[in-house]
Image (spheres, grey):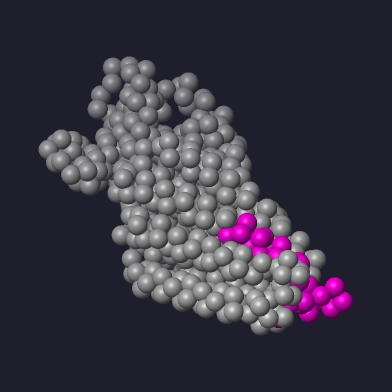
Amino acid sequence: MLFDTWYSALIFALAGLALFIFSAKILSTSLKQISGPKFKKQIFKISENRFAAMLFGIIFTTLIQSSDGSMALIMGLLAAGLIKLRGAIAFLLGANIGTATTSLIVSFQARFAFTEYFVLLLVIGIFGYMLVKKEKWSNIFYIIFAIGLIFLSLKLLSSGSKVIVKQEWFKSFVKQVGKNAWASFFFSFVLTGIMQSSSATVTLYQSIYEGQFYNDAGKFVLSKPEILSLPAAIGLVFGANVGTTVTGFIVSFTTKNINSKKIAIVWGFTNLSISILILAIIFYFSQLIELMIPLSLKAPSLQLSIAHLLFNAILVAIFIFLITYIVRFLDWLIKDDHMEKKFGFTLTKELIKTNNFLALEQGKQALTSMGKMVYEGLEKAEELTKKRSTKLKDQYNQLEEVVDNARKKLYFYLIELGQQKLTTEQSEIHMSLILSSRSLEKILDIGAEILAELDKVYDPKNKTQFLISQEVINHISELIKMNKAILQKSTDQIKYFKKERSHHIEEMSHDFDELSFKYAKENVSKLKSSIGKTQLDLDFDYSRVLRSLERINHHSLRINHYLKNSHWAKLNIY
């Protein structure tokens, strides 16, 4: 491509850079749209193995060509509770290697003529997008279009850069910036932090570095770099690696999610530490790169690609085996909120406007956490049928308050989510979350009524004795235990709905009602005896206790029914 003036070349180079950022963005967005619920579930399974998670991070980042996009996905999955911090760190390490593929694409585009035909993907993508009707196929052709756009942008950027690097004013500027690797590193860190795209800045550096080896006639000249040495160019690449982590810091520290902060720290620390380590021996590192890719191969940009790839390979080789210790250090450095640490209850409102699926997944995770809180409350209630304890009663009251606050937070979160454009299926799941959270809150409120009745019959002289029949107390304890089992299974349905478990819950609930009715009949027959007289004298209403226990059972059963009647069941039946 020929240019009349240097400023027309500059305009084309800037247009190519802008087009590259735009095309990488639409590629990332299109791939995310294709990934549905099944895709997210596979990620959860993959994240259990750090090497599988790392490999997935490499592949995913290679596809979307955006480390920021991968980071955003990791934070979203963490916030939604779909992956654990260990898996997220492994995914992030893989994403680092994935970013290096962009620079390899740039090198191949500059070296192999056949890559110019990739621009034809633009034609295939746009016509395919216009002709197909199904949304899935539209997204696929949109991806093809985005890939073609990437190669077109690289062609524009490369052509413009070869002219610009010959200008005296540009040579003077780059010489100042590239005095040494450290100066290059800090300049690139700032520039990438502003541009928020390491792929774009590394692509720019490759174009500049390669452009200085071509003469005015466009022929490759094997000579010493005139304006930017290899160590300085490598410093620019390393600065871009660290600069792009600024995005993660900004996003994570504007949210209340602890894990997002932790993963952002890992991202910044790993890139910065390896950069400092290699920059300290940059002379030897540069020599190694020159041995691997000598200039005689006429591929200067490939030198930077290999340097970039080797940097990330070293990073992964060191930190992949330190994940356990990294997690421990982060847990020590950033203390989790008591509620979040014990029950895993967390809500990140930023997810609401970025991804409806992940926002709903986080709602499910929060509801599951509420179920754990309520279950622990019922455990305290069961213990209180064995002995009088002010400490246990206080713990129950604290849990009741925590559940009330959690339900309010979840309610307002879901109301805000409901204002987004949800699909019919998502709306059904959304409603089941709201209704289920209300039932969970009611359980401990009702449980408090049972404990109030028990307060009337504790023996003041012996905290393990009661003033009424031990048989009645045993019946209450047995029914609470059954309620715990039903609640546990209903809570398990939130994450994965199982048809068999649903039938089992209904059977358990039916058995509970029959047993409760049996105890009620037995108690009525005893009301005329001394047992009944004691209850009346103490103002102990056993029938009220039984009704309260039945209401708890019915609320647990409702949770199962809410989930069963929503699209949730269709998505998660096993």
Q: Residue 537: x percent and y percent? A: 76, 70
- For the point 69% across and 56% down, the residue is 338
Q: Quadrant of residue 448?
A: bottom right
How many numbered marks appear? 0
- For the point 30% across and 33% down, the residue is 153
- Towards the viewer: 493 or 300: 493
Q: Quadrant of residue 130?
A: top left
- Towards the viewer: 422 or 466: 466
Q: Residue 481: x percent and y percent? A: 58, 75
Range shown magenta: 443-469
Q: Residue furthest bottom?
A: 471
Asked if residue 448 lies in the magenta stretch, the reply is yes
Q: Is residue 388 left or right of residue 91?
A: right
- Towards the viewer: 287 or 460: 460
Q: In the rendered view, tell whether residue 476 sits above or below residue 315.
A: below
Asked if residue 565 lies in the magenta stretch, the reply is no
Indicate the quadrant containing the N terminus: top left, top right, bottom left or bottom right.
Answer: top left
- For the point 74% across and 75% down, the residue is 534
Q: Residue 221: x percent and y percent? A: 34, 38
Q: In the rendered view, tell whether residue 562 sits above or below residue 154.
A: below
Q: In the rendered view, tell whether residue 545 sits above or below residue 345.
A: below
